[in-house]
Amino acid sequence: MRMVFDSYGQKCYKSYADAATLLLRFLKYKKPHDVKSNINPIAHTDKSFISFLHQNNVRGLEVMTKDGEWFTFEPSPSSFMIMAGDAFVAWSNGRIKACYHRVAVREENEVRYSLGVFSYQKGMIKTPDELIDEERPQQFKPFDHVDFLCYRDSSDNRVKAQSLIKTYWGV
Ligand SMILES: O=C(O)CCC(=O)C(=O)O
Ligand SMILES: [Fe+2]
């Protein structure tokens, strides 16, 4: 994270880190009997600032490439998946893209375990002034990260997850 902030000339990494709050989740998936509901959870972008994932050896995490193709993450004991979430998109004024992903366990009798650390900000997220200019005008209004999560939870917009941040906080 510090490297990303530095690369954008931002000296505010400490205040970002001080306001970060982390959620740790353990997840378990197996191939459902009903093949139609095999895609679980719904394809989405995370609402976090950034997410870190680690898992056992059972494949299942799929990420959409720029060309719209699903790519299956190849697990290994030493690999982590680090994904930008919607809040990072807004902070960077759209420079950073959120990772669109889903979990689909396709192998019979396999259980996939994953460990996710999701980083959220306490308080407001505002695009730094230096990341807004004529070439790239402001794309997102400042917003409270917890309000954004409440908006997600209180609506059926999960299914429109890919563009949720743009829908709610887009200028
Ligand atoms: O289990 C995983 O690897 C991903 C879970 C996930 O996408 C999420 O909890 O948002
Ligand atoms: Fe996710």
Image (cartoon, rainbow, N blue to C red):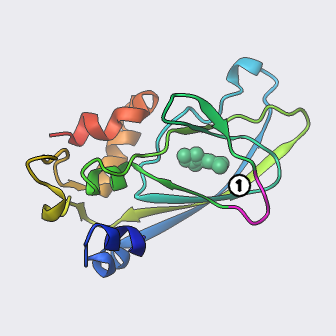
- Residue 34, image quadrant: top right
Secondary element type, mark 1: strand
> What is the magenta range?
75-79
Nearer to the camera, 19 or 60: 60
Secondary structure predominantly adopted by residues drawn in magenta: loop
Residue 116 point in image, percent of width and height: 61, 59
- Residue 25, image quadrant: bottom right
Ligand 1 lies under 8 Å from the Cβ of mark 1:
yes
Identity of the residue drawn at 80% across and 32% down: 31
Identity of the residue drawn at 28% across and 56% down: 92
Q: Quadrant of the C terminus?
A: top left
Residue 5 point in image, percent of width and height: 33, 70
Left or right, 39 with reference to 34: left
Q: Is residue 22 above or below residue 138?
A: below
Q: Is residue 10 above or below residue 166?
A: below
User: Badge 1, how many Cα within 10 Å: few under 14, some, many 20+?
Assistant: some
Nearer to the camera, 46 or 152: 46
Residue 137 point in image, percent of width and height: 12, 46
- Residue 144, image quadrant: bottom left
What residue would you read off at disc 1?
A: 114
* Residue, far right: 109
Left or right, 152 with reference to 66: left
Q: Does the stretch in magenta take in 126?
A: no
